[in-house]
Image (spheres, rainbow, N blue to C red):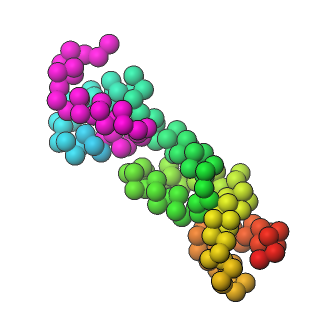
Amino acid sequence: MIPQKLKNNFYFKKILKYCSLSIKSESEVIRKLRDYEVPPEELTEMVDTLRVFKFFFSDEEYVSRFLENLSSQKGYSKIQLKQKLLRKGLPTKIVSIQLDEFYKKNESEQIGKFIKKNYSKLLRKDKNKRLAFLISKGFGVDNIRRQLKELDL
């Protein structure tokens, strides 16, 4: 049950609406409450209440779900995914660890998707520039060479 004093709290109502718009991470919720300039003791109580009722995901779980969802749809490079996550205010350490784990398992598949998405751009480049372009996006050299060889690029 939500405490009575929170039910009538203007900022709590705002943060509930914010959380209902889309899936949020704990860091995003805390940052938004700080933007509202909520006093620290109220902030703690609000975050604890929201955590109990699962209005947001822990940062680790959020990053994991974000990577699974976004990477299954389109081919994003490791650097693009990292930038998207960091823009959400997630801790760099958590993002880096989760990305490394994700790419250990899925790098070949992600390179393939990224190449298909950027196929016409890659065709205009010579072989060395294709390799350099893909390396600059955060992919591993061995996997890039393997994918380029499979696609005859």
**Residue 133 is drawn in which quadrant?**
bottom right
Q: Residue furthest top?
A: 1
Quarter of the picture holding the N terminus: top left
Name the residue: 33% across, 39% down: 29
| Along the viewing direction, whichever of 68 and 51 lies nearer the viewer | 68
Residue 22 figure quarter: top left
User: Whole-percent x and y of residue 107?
Assistant: 69, 58
User: In the rendered picture of this protein, how many numbered marks are placed on residues?
Assistant: 0
Residue drawn at (20%, 15%) of the image: 4
Which quadrant: the C terminus? bottom right
Q: Residue at x 25, y 16 (%)?
A: 3
The residue located at (30%, 30%) in the rendering is: 16
Left or right relative to 137: residue 87: left
The kind of secondary structure the magenta stretch mainly shows is helix
- For the question of whether residue 137 can be seen, the reply is yes
Q: Splitting the image into 4 quarters, where does residue 41 fall?
A: top left
Residue 74 position (above or below residue 142) = above
**48 up-or-down from 68: above or below:** above
Whether 29 is among the magenta residues is yes
Residue at the extreme front of the image, as rendered:
120
Q: Which residues are magenta?
A: 1-30
Place of residue 143 in the rendered image (x, y in percent of width and height, measured from the top left): 75, 66
